[in-house]
Amino acid sequence: MSDKNFTIILNQTTVRIEAEEEGRARYMVRMVKNGESGATRIGYLTGANQTWLAEPYSGTKQSFTATSAKEACTILAKMANSIQA
């Protein structure tokens, strides 16, 4: 597996999502908003192929399933954005 990078539009802002592999099928997910210099850790991503689990840093112990890494990362970004707002 390799690191994953996605660009999404979130509330009319371009956001880059970086998922850095930390172990077998486990990734640390960071979010960088357009115009900001630093990345914010937003959660973990675990999985492969069509089964992914998103675990947010938002203080909730709830996790979310997704069918793609991009979908899981988007869930994490939306949750982090709603907390930061």
Image (cartoon, rainbow, N blue to C red):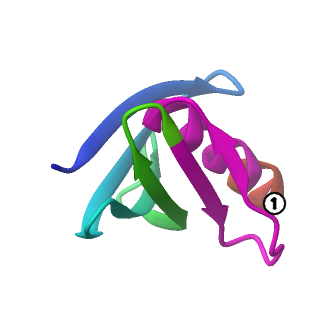
Q: Position of residue 58 (x, y in %)?
A: 75, 70
The amino acid type of the residue labelled 1 equals: Ile
Q: Which residue is mark 1?
A: 83
**Image position of 56 with respect to 19: above or below:** below
- Name the image quarter holding residue 57: bottom right
**Image position of 60 with respect to 1: above or below:** below
Nearest the viewer among 65 and 11 is 65
Start and end of the magenta stretch? 52-79
Residue, far left: 2
Residue beneath the point at 70% across and 56% down: 80
Residue beneath the point at 64% across and 64% down: 55
Left or right of 29: which side holds 13? right
Q: Position of residue 17 (x, y in %)?
A: 42, 44
Q: Is residue 54 magenta?
A: yes
Residue beneath the point at 81% across and 60% down: 83
Left or right of 50: which side holds 27? left
